[in-house]
Amino acid sequence: MRNYLFSMLSFKFLILACFLFVTTVYGQEEDNNSPNFIIIFADDLGYGDLGVFGNPSIKTPHLDKMSFEGQKWTNFYAAASVCTPSRAGLLTGRLPVRSGMASSTNRVLFPNSKNGLPASEITLAEQLKEAGYTTAAIGKWHLGHKEEFLPTNHGFDTYFGIPYSNDMDRLQGEAYKGYWKRPNDSIKTEHFNVPLLRGTEIVERPANQNNITKRYSDEAVTFINQQDETPFFLYLAHNLPHIPLFASEEFKGKSKRGLYGDVVEEIDNGVGKILDALKEKGLAENTIVVFTSDNGPWLPFKNNGGTAGLLRAGKGTTWEGGMRVPTLFWGPSILAPAVISDLGSTLDLFTTFCTMANTNIPTDRIIDGVDLTDVLLEGKPSPRKSVFYYRGSELFAARVGDYKAHFISQGAYGELGERVQHDLPLLFNVAFDASERFDIADAHPEILKEITELVFKHKSKLVRGKDQLVERE
């Protein structure tokens, strides 16, 4: 009897051990199957600047292919209409006004700015690192140039790029507006004393911007080739096509759209290299790549700026051209190919990628991003039903469904007029009228009432972060 009991106990322990082994291995496989994420973020690229979004002159075959194989989002919004708050929103999933990374005094950070993204903010990189991801940032940061604010102190394992916009630290004595009236061939990379960093160390100053797009893309490919079993997150934020415009010799004069087109076509070429690297490494089937822009085109620079297509206005404004951006999602065997006309935002990348990586969403703060997982994987309707349009720290407009109300409107960079506070808000059906030409407020008071009530509720609960952009040294 004793031997029988001993045998039965031994058998049970054996079964338990096998169960634990299988569970552990299966769990590890599940963890290792977490998708990789790549965000490619262009700077000042307009809604109408890609072939697949209707540009007749700029050839973007790799981005077009991303669209055909993946998803093209036609109602996708940046978190803000200028650089710094837009980037803060993407990486934190929070409206920039909550983190203090939006200001009506200084709309972006400068080389003499005192602050940057607060350490109290949780970035997507930090969230994914908690889930076991390897993280890398390449390109323009613009969330604080001091060491404490750089990517390696905000969840990224490595960083290679410039800390702020490529037109800053200009060495020429000529007035800013006068300088940009020069012909393109007289604008030189050495006129801008912008540092290129690896980690927190300056490795080149001034950064050679003639080939910087190529170097960023090559850096991304090198990072991809170094990956093995650990899931990864790569954030590639190009400096361009923000002015000054520079293209490598291979792409100069290539586009029918001039230098601006050359720049966009070189970015497209880099996207092709990245997708090829994923395929060659066997990672394409388990990687989601997002391509989008930080805001709309910088219109005052005319042919050296992009186009918002049929959308009204551009960078710096809360008209559609300032914040609706061309957006593509790519992920063979993961995403359901489609054209998505539902609402989405760069704010949503935080929540969506955290969900896909099986890491918890922070509960100690308001997260404005919604989870787009079911839209991406199954083609279900988007849970995002509204968009808030901030200019600096002020709410100028709001969209609910197809309708958008402007409570305040204003041009930018000397174009499209001064600030106007609308006693009766302007109302547009931006599904019918993406150019915002036909004010229908008088005909739809009930819709205006709905949007106004949403804005009132939002403002009544809003806790603003301390303005991090206002102080300079």
Image: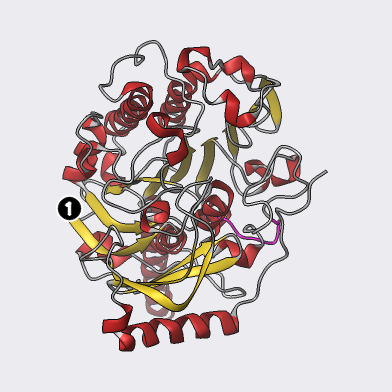
In the picture provided, is 296 more to the left or to the right than 199?
Answer: left
Hey, which residue is sitting farthest top in the picture?
249
Rendered residue at 41%/79% (across/down): 5
Q: Give neighbour class at mark 1: few <14, some 14-19, many 20+ (Cα, 10 Å).
A: many
Residue 46 painted magenta: no
Q: Quadrant of the N terminus?
A: bottom left
Residue 17, image x, y percentages: 42, 64
Taking depth in this image into account, of 166 and 6 the one nearest to the observer is 166
Hey, which residue is sitting farthest right in the picture?
473
Taking depth in this image into account, of 310 and 64 the one nearest to the observer is 310
Q: Is residue 396 visible?
A: yes
Q: Quadrant of the C terminus?
A: top right
Amino acid type shown at disc 1 = Pro
Rendered residue at 64%/63% (across/down): 99
Residue 24, image x, y percentages: 42, 60
Taking depth in this image into account, of 459 and 269 the one nearest to the observer is 459
Residue 119 painted magenta: yes
- Magenta stretch: dominant SS? loop
Q: Which residue is mark 1?
A: 337
Taking depth in this image into account, of 263 and 259 the one nearest to the observer is 259
Residue 155, image x, y percentages: 61, 49
What's the magenta region? 118-123
